[in-house]
Image: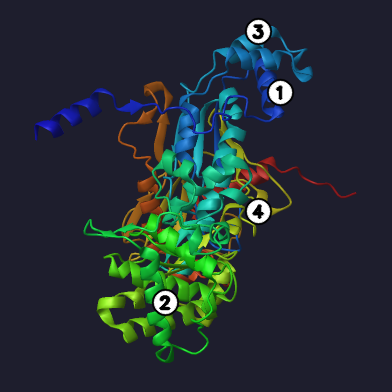
Amino acid sequence: AVVRELCFRRTMERPFRRLPRCHNSLTTALLVDTYQITMAYAYWRNGSHNRFASFDLFFRKNPFNGEFTVFAGLEECLRFVSNFHFTDADINYLRNEPFARAMDSAFFDHLAKLDCSQLRILSQLEGNIVFPRVPLIRVEGPLLVAQLLETPLLALVNYASLVATNAARHRIMAGECATLLEFGLRRAQGTDGGVSASRYAFLGGFDGTSNLEAGRQFGIPCKGTHAHSYVQSFMGFRDIIDQRLQKSDGSWCSNFVALVKEQLQILVETKEQLPEGIRLLDTNKGELAAFTSYAIAFPSSFLALVDTYDVLRSGLPNFLAVSLALRQCGYQPLGIRIDSGDLSYLSIQARQIMRAVEEALGDVRAGGFSNLGITASNDIHEEVLYSLNRHGHSITAFGIGTHLVTCLRQPALGCVYKLVDIDGSPRIKLSEDAEKITIPGKKEAYRLYLKNGEPVVDVMIQVGEAKPEIAQRILCLHPFISSKRAYVSASHVERLHHLVWDGLNGGIPFNLDLSLSTARARCMSTIKTMRPDHLRYSNPTPYKVSVSEQLYDFIHKLWLEEAPIGEIV
């Protein structure tokens, strides 16, 4: 009780906080497009730089032909905002750029004093499932500073949300029970892309990564076995220098190689009890030596890559021989990894053989072999998972790289950052393409739930408008298509936007949990509330995004006021 009281008092004494710098040192005040600086100068030159502006960061279409998106990148945005300022080196660089040489030197003095202490930022929470048009982030404050945040915030949200969404889609397709491992570092767009992909794949539902740097920075579990090169480096048992293995009870097996040979011979003698097609007499001896060496190094976590030469005729029999030897020493193997070939067929055959070995040799020698892990890592993506589910497989874990981290199906999310209010006057961006028309003014958003716990619609209202209440009959309208409307009586109402930055009061609310584990848990739990037809791979049902009747009327009133009137002569 005393500890809780002290924690409460400390929270009350410092209700706001700031974060350390972004994990990537390149995320500086100069991580902007040139036009942000030219606009900033024009605002300053015009004396309008301190006008109170509101910007919405949002996207227009869900990625990957799907109907949901996972919001990610908020913590990095707040790290950036916490430390935003132009250094002396930044200012000197800008002064000497050709486009800036004609600028008044007093402008650079103004830039040098800028920070985010005058801004307020409201945002959806990281890991939340989000939908088009509903703002992910709203930035309020002096026009010049708010404008300068455009590109860095977009850069920090776009890729993060895209990877997290891609990961979540793979998790849905693989199912809750499968282990998903991110193996994409070597195929990522640069080192930062690799580390960021590991982080946001974990947020989206993956269980671990091969990337040790990401594991160090973000506490993500790291997994890995060996490559084909390790197997190829062995030509036979003569390449094993130390053939001893310490047993689980602390005693020693003085010649583990001899024990492996003995277990291989036992497999040969039980060949008739095993499925047809498995060869036990002529496995690759270099591969067997490699597996033996690796088991000596990692007896309690032995998992072998079995497709260097032939999965069923060499890799699997060699794995089983070494695994039986490990069992004699008190250890349980973990399983195999397959990195090529027909994953459906090979995994099913491997599972049948593992079961047959356990049945033939019994629990004492081969207990648990029926449930050994089978990891697949052969250029896997969402469509491959979909096909495996249709045709059947026995895979328990997937290592996924290229298609996950590069988001090959869709390389960009397409978030935008639009001015929606200036000095209390709502602004609208018009276009012949209705999809690109913005929803003007400062808005709040709420998610309405039905009695069964499923969310049915996200509705935006004007700031100051009465918020939706439970059991209240609310008219929800499509922002631009008048015929798309419905009354909703919600059993639960969730506020989507939260204060995440209050510069005047010191920064980030102290009780705002920005941890990766919390964002990951939020992503997983929110997905579970969604209707399956919103999440399915083929032809998913669009989730409803609406506006209140009051906001609908205002949008169309402002639209008519701002649109020029044509004249036909």
Residue 43 image position (x, y, % from top left): 66, 20
Contact check, label 3 and label 4, Cβ < 8 Å: no
Spatial separation of the CA atoms under disc 1 and disc 4: 28 Å
| Cα distance in 3D space between marks 1 and 3 | 14 Å
Residue pictured at 29% horizontal, 70% vertical: 328
Q: Which residue is mark 1?
A: 38
In the image, taking residue 12 as reference, residue 204 lies left or right, namely right
Q: Is residue 202 above or below residue 511?
A: below
Q: Residue beneath label 3, please? A: 106
**Circle 1 SS class:** helix
Q: CA distance from mark 3 to mark 2?
A: 81 Å
Residue identified by numbered label 4: 435
Q: Quick check: can you spot residue 456?
A: no
Q: Nearer the viewer, mark 3 or mark 4?
A: 3
Position above or below: 189 against 370: above
Q: Comparing marks 1 and 2, which lies closer to the viewer?
A: 2
Q: Do callouts 1 and 2 mark residues in contact (Cβ within 8 Å)?
A: no
Residue 7 in the image: state x and y as whole percent.
19, 30
Q: Which residue is mark 2?
A: 264
Amino acid type of the residue tagged 3 in the rendering: Ala
Instruction: Identify which amino acid the numbered label 1 is placed on.
Output: Thr
Point out the residue furthest to the bottom here: 272
Q: Are marks 1 and 3 in contact (CB under 8 Å)?
A: no
- The reply, left or right, for residue 146 in relation to residue 100 is left
Residue contact between numbered discs 4 and 2, judged by CB atoms under 8 Å: no
